[in-house]
Amino acid sequence: MSVLMYPIATEKAINMIERNNVVTFMVDTRSNKTQIRKEFEDMFKVKVDKVNVEIEPRNRKRAYIRIRKEFKASDIALKLKLV
């Protein structure tokens, strides 16, 4: 089971990449912050500073993943072809 489903590419999400070093993903509704952090770190070989989760209507869950300052969210966005 994969915890991370797909990245979000809205205007707000792109601004968060540039300004706050945050990548936004839709995640499995049964996942928790620890699982999200571990899978993201393993997938992209970076260290995560913080994970915030937002539960949306229609049984969806969005994760805001802040990356530590020594890594760049824009590099991950390039790998995901978001920018």
Image (cartoon, grey):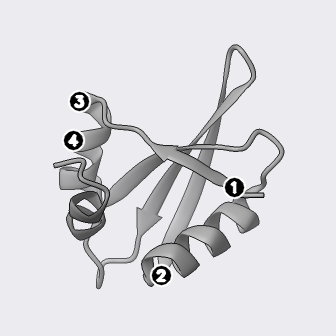
At which x and y percent is residue 18? 18, 53
Name the mark nearer the viewer: 4 or 1: 1
Distance between the Cα atoms at labels 1 and 3? 23 Å
Judged left or right of residue 25, residue 76 is left
Look at the numbered discs 4 and 2 and tell me whether their residues touch, using CB distance below 8 Å: no
At which x and y percent is residue 83? 16, 49
Mark 4, residue position:
15
Q: Secondary structure at mark 4?
A: helix
Distance between the Cα atoms at labels 4 and 2? 20 Å
Q: Residue at x 23, y 29 (%)?
A: 11
Mark 1, residue position:
3
Q: Residue at x 71, y 14 (%)?
A: 58
Mark 1 closeness class: few <14, some 14–19, many ≥20 residues within 10 Å: some
Look at the numbered discs 1 and 2 and tell me whether their residues touch, using CB distance below 8 Å: no
Mark 3, residue position:
11
Q: Is residue 66 above or below residue 31?
A: below
Q: Quadrant of residue 23?
A: bottom left
Disc 3 residue type? Glu
Q: Residue at x 58, y 58 (%)?
A: 51
Q: Secondary structure at mark 3?
A: helix
Disc 4 residue type? Asn
Mark 2 closeness class: few <14, some 14–19, many ≥20 residues within 10 Å: some
Look at the numbered discs 3 and 4 and tell me whether their residues touch, using CB distance below 8 Å: yes
Q: Quadrant of residue 13?
A: top left
Judged left or right of residue 69, residue 38 is right
Judged left or right of residue 30, residue 4 is left
Mark 2, residue position:
47
Quadrant in the picture for the N terminus: bottom right
**Which of the two discs, 1 and 2, labels the residue nearer the N terminus?**
1
